[in-house]
Amino acid sequence: MSAPAVVLASTNAELIRLVAAAFEEEAVPLQVLSEPISARAAAVRSPLGVGLSVDGAELVVALSTGTTGAYFQGPVGDARLLGRAAARLAARRPLGDFGT
């Protein structure tokens, strides 16, 4: 049985690589789905209640509870930074300085 994971919905190999690297650094499991679903739908599928997906040029992070929209989002070019923040959110750790 695998550990509970955050769900990333994407088929973009470079984005997956960057987000996965951030999750590995934070020691948080990541599951990748190739289905075109929203970040909220990905969060509902995640036992940790956090999901990510791409919406246009934005990487969106959503929670399975609370607001139905994005919890936070940013340019796809910041995938590693956003992935780190999402991993820390799932691990219930402080987000730290978003600029580093």
Image (cartoon, helix red, strand yellow):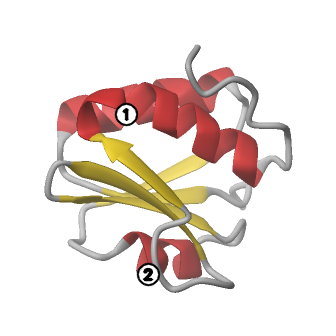
1 or 44: nearer the eye? 44
Tag 1: Cα neighbours inside 10 Å, few (<14), some, or many (≥20)? many
The spot of residue 99 in percent (x, y) is: 56, 20
Residues 2 and 92: in front is 92
Locate the N terminus and report the quarter of the image it occupies: bottom right
Report helix, strand or loop for mark 1: helix
The answer for how far apart the CA atoms under marks 1 and 2 are is: 19 Å
Tell me whether circle 1 and circle 2 mark residues in contact (CB < 8 Å).
no
The type of residue carrying mark 1 is Ala
From what the image shows, is residue 69 above or below residue 74? below
From this view, report whether residue 20 is shown above or below residue 66.
above
Q: Residue at x 28, y 40 (%)?
A: 75
Mark 2 residue element: helix
Q: Is disc 2 surrounded by few (<14), some (14 to 19) or many (20+) residues within 10 Å? A: many
Instruction: Point out the tag, 1 or 2, that comes first from the N-terminus.
Output: 2
- Which residue corresponds to mark 1? 79
Residue type, numbered disc 2: Ala
The residue depicted at 41 percent of the width and 69 percent of the height is 39
Q: Which residue is mark 2?
A: 41
| Position of 40 relative to 88 (above/below) | below
**Marker disc for residue 19:** none
- Comparing labels 1 and 2, the label whose residue is closer to the camera: 1
Image position, residue 42 (x, y; %): 46, 72
Residue name at image x 60 percent, y 71 percent: 46
Place of residue 12 in the rendered image (x, y in percent of width and height, measured from the top left): 17, 43
- Left or right of 70, for residue 11: left
The answer to whether 99 appears left or right of 87 in the picture is: left
Name the quadrant containing residue 32.
bottom left
How far across and how far down the image is residue 100, in percent?
A: 58, 13
In terms of image quadrants, where is residue 37? bottom left
